[in-house]
């Protein structure tokens, strides 16, 4: 260890010389974070637990140090190293070093852009897309730093999946009719072989896009997740999931209106080779059409989206979930003397990175219907048809008032376990009010409100398979500026879910093998208050007191509350 520190100091001493020699061919960037949680657990859940501590104190200090190296005009290397020390790692005993990010990108022949190593990959919502997790949208500002930290740590970016591989793209410009053609391709490693029974799996994707008449865009998209032959010594089983789609988008100008017409349609194919008991699946089709009308002078917008996604549609790149409700919490993970995992609550979903997934999965993973039951896999959710209508308006003074409304109606295409089908309705309203704008106050006073109500019904053939499930979310946030850059932040989230559902249990082939009965009379709340100091746009400090309650009357013995003092300091440079 002594030699390591000597070597580290030596390298740091040479850095200024290296920078000067490279004539600014090397740039530094990074981020740092300190988190501290002092929590207490209470409720009937601990009455049958004699081993779980009633209080926990956790925290971490970490630092990401990155280099941008430009060996030439047409190439760039990015590398980021993370140094992390848990609160319990005294005297450096808990320090962890790891390489967080590494890639090389550049330009070949002054035309082809390429990147190898770590990639942020995204295509369309039906081919390769990282959908937002439940509860992650329209939250009060008091939660922003926590959700941003999770997105940063998991490399979610703009709905992208972080993968390792190579990508390249090339574009061609034309003068008439066709303005531009853009071709993109990627290949990544999706799964590592165990050298015995599970082979390597690769994920390939490509897009060919043409822009015509300065307003029309047409694209063909293709993805395929496939196993590589002979990479597992004792198995010839192979899996493949491909998706083909066509996209069209047209931008129109009608007086003061900006009109955007869009659509995507395609199909998926799943095959198994040399696999015992593997099913033979028909191709799954999907269709999606939308219109969006924007009037910037009148400050309103309306959007309509209609879609149909067949039961057999499978897309490993678009149906993989961020949230994994089978994961174990980092705080109070077990109860009943470590026999059972603690049920996830909203506070865990909003602040605990353990619940978040970074990998593409061929299986439709479990979800929590109390948080989202209509489209748990985003737009690509199979066995759904219906549509959304969205309206938005903001005052001419955009800091004063913004309002948006979203109404959705969907139903199943095929009944699950019965000929009867589910019907879904969803209604959302979002309002942001700048109170200080009403009286021209200089100190910011902001109030936000979000309400979401979702209903699921199914008329049972004999009453046995009847479903009636309702949920409502209410989010309220208040931000009051005391002095420049210092705010008091108050927030509350309420969730009520009541009724019954039947949750599909699937095998490794994605076949439904059982329906698990789910009954809920659930009430969850989060109340928090604290301060936020914004040093600048990249650095902030939050100190909060948080209280979270979880109570399902059908599982009254598991009722619990968590009270927490949370401190988070986050910076980027």
Image (cartoon, rainbow, N blue to C red):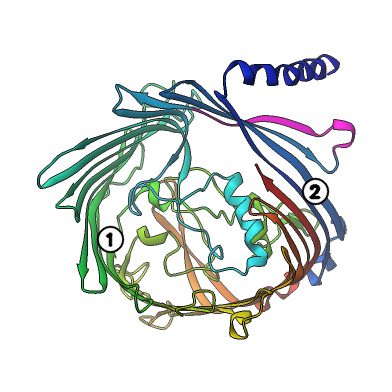
- Whole-percent x, y for residue 450 in the image: 55, 77
Any part of residue 383 in sight: yes
Q: Is residue 455 left or right of residue 256?
A: right
Residue 284 has which mark?
none
Category of crowding for the residue at label 2, using alpha-carbon neighbours closer than 10 angstroms: few (below 14), some (14–19), many (at least 20): some
Of 104 and 269, which appears nearest the observer? 104
Q: Is residue 389 left or right of residue 484?
A: left
- Start-end of magenta stretch: 89-103
Q: Is residue 11 left or right of residue 507?
A: right
How far apart marks 2 and 1 lie (CA) works out to 46 Å
User: Which quadrant: the C terminus?
Assistant: top right
Circle nearer the N terminus (2, 1): 2
User: At numbered mark 2, what does the secondary structure look like: helix, strand or loop?
Assistant: strand
- Whole-percent x, y for residue 394 in the image: 45, 78
Q: Chief secondary structure of the magenta span?
A: strand
Q: Is residue 306 magenta?
A: no
Residue at 59%, 85% in the rendered image: 438
Above or below, comparing residue 150 to residue 550 in the picture: above
Q: Are marks 2 and 1 in contact (CB under 8 Å)?
A: no
Above or below, comparing residue 66 to residue 260 in the picture: above
Residue at 78%, 45% in the rendered image: 60
- Quadrant hosting residue 258: bottom left
- Whole-percent x, y for residue 472 in the image: 55, 79
Q: Which residue is mark 1?
A: 310
Q: Which residue is mark 2?
A: 59
- Whole-percent x, y for residue 387 in the image: 31, 72
Of 423 and 9, which appears nearest the observer? 9
Q: Is residue 102 magenta?
A: yes
């Amino acid at each position: 260890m002594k030699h390591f520190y000597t070597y580290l100091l030596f390298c740091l001493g040479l850095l200024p010389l290296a920078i000067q020699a490279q004539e600014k061919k090397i740039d530094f960037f990074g981020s740092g974070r300190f988190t501290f949680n002092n929590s207490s657990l209470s409720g009937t859940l601990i009455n049958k637990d004699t081993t779980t501590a009633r209080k926990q104190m956790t925290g971490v200090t970490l630092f990401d140090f990155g280099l941008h190296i430009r060996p030439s005009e047409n190439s760039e290397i990015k590398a980021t190293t993370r140094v992390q020390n848990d609160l319990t790692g005294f005297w450096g005993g808990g320090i962890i070093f790891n390489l967080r990010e590494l890639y090389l990108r550049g330009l070949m022949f002054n035309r082809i852009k390429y990147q190898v190593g770590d990639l942020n990959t995204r295509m369309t919502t039906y081919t390769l897309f990282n959908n937002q997790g439940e509860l992650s949208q329209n939250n009060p500002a008091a939660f922003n730093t926590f959700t941003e930290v999770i997105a940063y740590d998991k490399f979610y970016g703009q709905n992208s999946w972080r993968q390792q591989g190579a990508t390249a793209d090339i574009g061609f410009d034309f003068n008439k009719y066709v303005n531009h053609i853009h071709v993109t391709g990627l290949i990544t490693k999706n799964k590592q072989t165990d050298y015995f029974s599970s082979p390597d799996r690769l994920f390939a994707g490509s897009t060919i896009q043409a822009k015509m008449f300065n307003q029309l865009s047409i694209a063909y998209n293709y993805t395929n997740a496939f196993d590589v032959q002979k990479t597992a010594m004792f198995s010839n089983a192979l899996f493949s999931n491909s998706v083909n789609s066509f996209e069209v988008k047209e931008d129109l100008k009608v007086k003061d209106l900006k009109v955007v017409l869009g659509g995507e349609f395609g199909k998926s194919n799943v095959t198994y080779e040399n696999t015992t008991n593997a099913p033979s699946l028909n191709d799954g089709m999907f269709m999606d059409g939308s219109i969006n009308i924007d009037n910037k002078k009148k400050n309103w917008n309306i959007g309509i989206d209609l879609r149909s996604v067949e039961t057999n549609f499978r897309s490993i790149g678009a149906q993989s979930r961020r949230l994994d409700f089978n994961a174990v919490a980092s705080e109070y993970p077990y109860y009943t003397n470590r026999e059972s995992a603690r049920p996830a609550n909203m506070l865990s979903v909003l602040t605990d990175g353990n619940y978040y997934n970074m990998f593409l999965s061929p299986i439709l993973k479990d979800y929590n219907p109390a948080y989202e039951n209509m489209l748990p896999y985003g737009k690509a959710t199979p066995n759904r048809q219906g549509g959304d209508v969205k309206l938005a308006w903001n005052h001419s003074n955009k800091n004063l008032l913004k309002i948006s409304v979203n109404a959705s109606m969907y139903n199943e295409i095929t009944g699950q376990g019965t000929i009867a089908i589910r019907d879904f309705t969803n209604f959302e309203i979002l309002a942001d009010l700048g109170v200080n704008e009403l009286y021209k106050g200089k100190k910011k006073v902001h109030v936000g409100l979000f309400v979401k109500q979702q209903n699921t019904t199914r008329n049972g053939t004999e009453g046995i398979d009847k479903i009636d499930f309702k949920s409502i979310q209410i989010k309220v946030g208040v931000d009051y500026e005391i002095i420049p850059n210092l705010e008091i932040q108050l927030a509350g989230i309420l969730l009520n879910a009541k009724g019954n559902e039947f949750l599909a249990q699937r095998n490794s082939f994605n076949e439904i093998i059982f329906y698990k009965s789910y009954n809920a009379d659930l009430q969850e709340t989060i109340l928090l208050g604290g301060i936020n100091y914004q040093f600048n746009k990249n650095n902030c400090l939050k100190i909060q007191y948080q209280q979270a309650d979880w109570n399902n009357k059908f599982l009254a013995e598991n009722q619990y509350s968590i009270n927490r003092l949370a401190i988070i300091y986050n910076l980027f440079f």
